[in-house]
Amino acid sequence: MTAQVINSAESLQRVLGDIRQLWNQHKFLRLNIKTGKDRSLDQSALSHVWYAQIAQELREDTPEGVKCECKLRFGVPILRAADADFREMYDTAIRGHLSYEQKLKAMRFLPVTSLMTVKQLSQYLEDVQAHYATRGVVLEFPEEGRRA
């Protein structure tokens, strides 16, 4: 069974039917249920604007490098705290096995922010904003996008 979105009574009934059919076939199911919406396109676009701004103002890294650092510094802790499967994967494959520089390289390929809900990505953006404010970079939210 692939990921299913339940956002109406009809989609709920369809998914319940799918689950019932799978149960009858296999007699064993493992379900992962996530609540909340996926990240918004506005949040994603804002994060990329911020990566470019940080790179331009600090001149220490490229926007891609800033993105990797932010994913590692701020995104990974959010996902580790909220998602047991992500935590297990990260801890087993990356946490104790790679240097900081190797972890940064891994962030080019490891999905982090794309796995976040709107609420998690809001926290991520606020953490990035607060961190870079201490370095003199003022990152601003559009008025309607501050808290999704």
Image: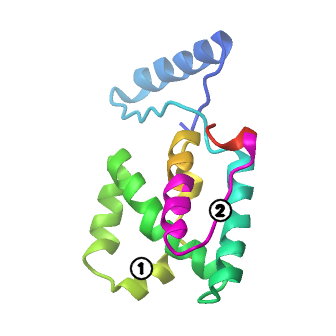
Of the residues shown, which amino acid type is indicated by label 2? Leu
Badge 2: residue crowd in 10 Å (few <14, some 14–19, many ≥20): some
| Quadrant housing residue 28 | top left
Secondary structure type for disc 2: loop
Tell me what residue is drawn at x 42 percent, y 88 percent.
101
Q: Nearer the viewer, mark 2 or mark 1?
A: 2
Secondary structure type for disc 1: helix
Q: Which mark is residue 103?
A: 1
Q: Does residue 9 sit above or below 38 in this rendering? A: above
Q: Which mark is residue 139?
A: 2
x, y percent for residue 82:
37, 45
- Depth check, front residue: 142 or 136: 136
Q: Does residue 133 belong to the magenta stretch?
A: yes
Residue 49 appears left or right of 28: right
Q: CA distance from mark 2 to mark 1?
A: 25 Å
The outermost residue toward the left is 96
Tell me what residue is drawn at x 71 percent, y 57 percent.
46
- Depth check, front residue: 121 or 9: 121
x, y percent for residue 3:
57, 38
Tell me what residue is drawn at x 70 percent, y 42 percent.
145
Tell me what residue is drawn at x 35 percent, y 55 percent.
80
Q: Quadrant of the C terminus?
A: top right
Query: Where are the magenta residues, as a range?
Result: 125-143
Q: Which mark is residue 11?
A: none
